[in-house]
Image (spheres, rainbow, N blue to C red):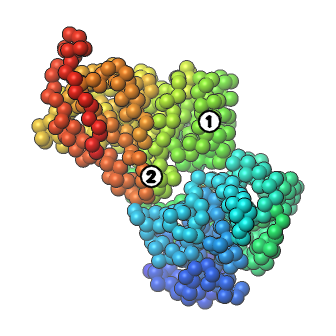
Amino acid sequence: MRAISAKAALKQGLLQEKWALSWEESAVGFSFANDIATPLLDQIRGPDDLKCFEYDDLLRLASELRAETLRIVSETGGHLGSSLGVVELTVAIHAIFSAPRDTIIWDVSHQCYPHKILTGRRERMRSLRKKDGVSGFTRRGESVFDPFGAAHSSTSISAGLGFAAARDLKGCEGHVVCIIGDGAMSAGMAFEAMNNAGNSGRPMIVILNDNDMSISESTGALSQHLAAVRQGTGARAGNLFENFGFDYRGPIDGHDLDLLLPLLAELRDHRHGPILLHVVTQKGAGYAPAEQAADKYHGVNPFDLETGVQAKAAAKAPSYTRVFADALIEEARQDDRIVAITAAMAAGTGVDRFQTAFPDRAFDVGIAEQHAVTFAAGLAASGMKPFCAIYSTFLQRAYDQIVHDVALQQLPVRFAIDRAGLVGADGPTHAGAFDVLCLANLPGFTVMAASDEAELVHMVATAAAHDHGPIAFRYPRGEGTGVALPTKGELLPIGRGRVIEHGSQIALLSFGTRLADCLKARRLLALEGISVTVADARFAKPLDTELLADLVDTHSMLVTVEEGATGGFGALVLHHLANRGMLDGRCAIRTLTLPDTFIAQASPEDMYEEARLTARHIAATARNGLGVARPHVDIRRSARAGQQELPTRLHRAEDR
Ligand SMILES: Cc1ncc(C[n+]2csc(CCOP(=O)(O)OP(=O)(O)O)c2C)c(N)n1
């Protein structure tokens, strides 16, 4: 790595003129070297150190902070564009306010890297998003400077109002500052909070960081309104926020410390009710490859600082997301009632591909999962075939809409649940753990999980044809298994699983993509002479009761395996078997689920290792269980002879 001057960086198109100036002033040069000089940043042990800096020093500090953020994320990967956009804002906030006495809350908190660097975590930043490392989001357990954890959006104003109310009730001092993006501001929860905060009259500060970007471009009327305000062509934004009971300042350039510092000082001294400062920033600011990218480098892999090119392992198979999108496009060619809905995750869910094919039939409703679901319910009630493509973790926000608006009315909304299971570096806030137990316990819901990408194609077709109530199918983050893809999806018989491999002693019943690990476990057990059946349940609801009866009758041991929390597929299997008297002294049963903990960030492989859901763990569970299971007898024959004749043996508690 070499250090180059700002002029050279400018020439190479890595830097725009506006930023080159501050690089030049900072006298550190635009450096790609790992040992870049950061003399001012080196003096910062915590935010109080900023208080001794003069204005010029703060300007230089911002340059160093931007360089440091870039350098770290180029090595670790992570949320870059949003962090680059708030460098000056972060410096200004910590120069004016006194965290942790003042409460600083970052909405979503994917933009918190500069904040972490300034609040004593600089040395640990290379462990960002890694196992046992610094979280990519604010986390209460990580630092006193993170008073409130986040990762899902639009929570900051509600939480901030909670802090403000507690402060007032306890008779304490301290400012509450919430920084929220224009994307996050569009969600219902932010408006609910403003409605409450504006009426409360409690002093608190909301900084609206308006970069006119969500992950993709911002959508919706609020976004248009803010654009008009920025351009000075429409109503003052103040009207909107003032009508909610907030004082309003702005819009101002959020990269201009000259403007930011005095305004924040004014806000600090403003003690009369809530106030909103509207700052305009640029996502990816100060790094040309980010500024020019369509997604402004929202989330990046490690990348080459000189070129901006991200490291990417060659894909061995298409991603599940892509397979879903392409399968849906195929179905939509045959049926013009099919429409796709995303809540601000067009690229993440593949709805962007669908939108390219059918611009009028794709809806990006903004960060609004609740609305997305009820909007889909309205479409379904009108005879359309809505596919709501939402990550498992974000679907949590729309549970009442799923129950009340969809399930209760038995409306055929199709839920395409992406990122099911553990997701890796984003950690527990993004794990898709709870959708099965939430959905499969609702009357009339059909719930499927794809075991590979070919199955996903079939499930898209099955969902498209399913008009008798809500139906969901889940699939994980990342690449498929590489199986051949069918040219056309087949209709799966509802509530029917399939046996993949036949054996005689142990049955592994998988729901989802742990099927591959079950097959590996089968091979491991075969080495020990243990004969294993592997089945793919396909459905958690309705359960394939015939398959279950068959597996229980003909094996000494049944192990269910799923990438979800307890209370899901395995629990439904146990309920069914228990209530039919099929646990009474028959086959030993174990249910492998995610453990009853929130698993910390790590690679997906490490997370599954911790969850004890790998082939090795499946084999060990089966082997241990077989040790206590009674030897297999042909139970089916005995059962036919009369249940009372069956040997009684208590089902042992799970001993994982
Ligand atoms: C409830 C919820 N839905 C979706 C997301 C995924 N998401 C993460 S960041 C983001 C965009 C946020 O945009 P904005 O608030 O404007 O911040 P910016 O990245 O532009 O700084 C989205 C949709 C989320 N974090 N939470």
- The residue type indicated by label 1 comes to Asp
Quadrant where the N terminus lies? bottom left
* Residue 241 shows in the view: no
Depth order, front residue of 103/384:
103
Q: Quadrant of residue 332?
A: top right
- Above or below, 486 relative to 52: above
**Which numbered dot is residue 101?**
none
Q: How crowded is mark 2: few (under 14 residues within 10 Å), some or many (20 or more)?
A: some
Residue hosting label 1: 400
Q: Residue at x 57, y 56 (%)?
A: 151
- SS under mark 1: helix
Residue hosting label 2: 598
- The residue type indicated by label 2 comes to Phe
Depth order, front residue of 18/172:
172
Q: Give the mark, 1 or 2, whose residue is nearer the N terminus.
A: 1
Determine whether the beta carbon of the residue marked 1 sits less than 8 angstroms from the nearest atom of ligand 1. no
Side of 531 where 125 appears, left or right: right
Quadrant where the C terminus lies? top left
Depth order, front residue of 639/528:
639
Q: Quadrant holding ligand 1?
A: bottom right
Side of 545 where 354 appears, left or right: right
Q: Where is residue 71 in the image (x, y as percent from the top left)?
A: 50, 75
Q: Which residue is drawn at 65% across and 48% down?
A: 367
Q: Position of residue 75 (x, y in %)?
A: 45, 70
- SS under mark 2: loop
Q: Which residue is drawn at 55% across and 82% down?
A: 45
Side of 79 where 449 appears, left or right: left
Q: Where is residue 419 in the image (x, y as percent from the top left)?
A: 48, 45
